[in-house]
Amino acid sequence: MKRPDLNQAIKVAIADDHALFRAGVKTALAVKKDVELIAEADNGMQLLNLLKHVEPDVILLDIQMPIMDGIQTLPEIRKDHPNVKVIILSMHNDHSMISKLMEIGANSYLTKNSDSETIYQAIKTCYEQEFFFNELTNKALLTGLRTRRPEIGAPQDINLTEKELTVLKLMCEEKTTKEIADIVDISPRTVEAIRDKLKTKTGAKSMAGLVMYAVKNGIIVQQ
């Protein structure tokens, strides 16, 4: 995984068919010295074309857009630009939709009535730590677990080392890579290596998938 350069401005692109909303986000981010809005698109197809010429670190992606919506666009971004962080924007807080989008590669999910500081914090946190979890995403993921029928033949006997279990629990507690490294007394690079190994062992494709694996297998307890 590409390591973020914390000394340069975070390059952001936004895809949303409401010009007024884009303008509002642009104005809000303009006062932040460590964030730079480099591209705007009206729909997913236009965004994918822009990504052939610009390389944002974070994308703000609206769900409901004409021509190509966010749900269709997200897998294409993941396929061709795996290191880009994607924050979903929506007017709705449907738990099943949030859970689905987090599973297929979203790094966070915000409602459009989120204040500008929350959007800024989500951008920074996704860039630096890969995910920005909030009450909305956490509830959605846990609701998804409660309503989903157990997968027949799901691997229950994966052997995780004590260190892997410790790191997984700390990740589920939303500890940062640096915090985990300090607690376990290993380097941040080792934390990232263990996270990648956990994904390989469990078959999870994202942090959301790892959280689901941990809850399903009793590694962490649902609240």
Image (cartoon, grey):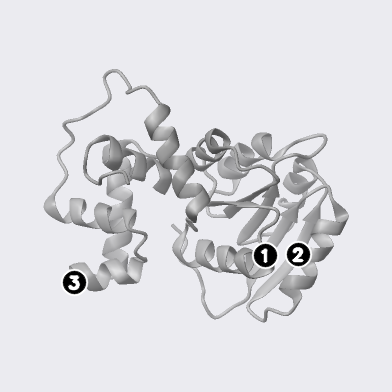
Image depth: mark 2 or mark 3 in front: 2
In the displayed structure, does residue 198 sit left or right of residue 185? right
Secondary structure of residue under mark 1: loop
Residue type for callout 3 = Asp
> Where is mark 1, residue-wise?
115
Image depth: mark 2 or mark 1 in front: 1
Secondary structure of residue under mark 2: helix
Residue name at image x 50 percent, y 68 percent: 4
> Where is mark 3, residue-wise?
185
Residue name at image x 20 percent, y 30 percent: 156
Residue lying farthest top?
152
Q: Is residue 141 above or below residue 194?
A: above
Mark 2 or 3, nearer chain start? 2
Crowding around mark 3 (Cα neighbors within 10 Å: few <14, some 14 to 19, many 20+) is: few
Residue type for callout 2 = Val
- Residue 89 percent location from the top left of the image: 67, 50
Distance from the alpha carbon under mark 2 to that under mark 3: 40 Å
- Residue 54 percent location from the top left of the image: 72, 59
> Where is mark 2, residue-wise?
25
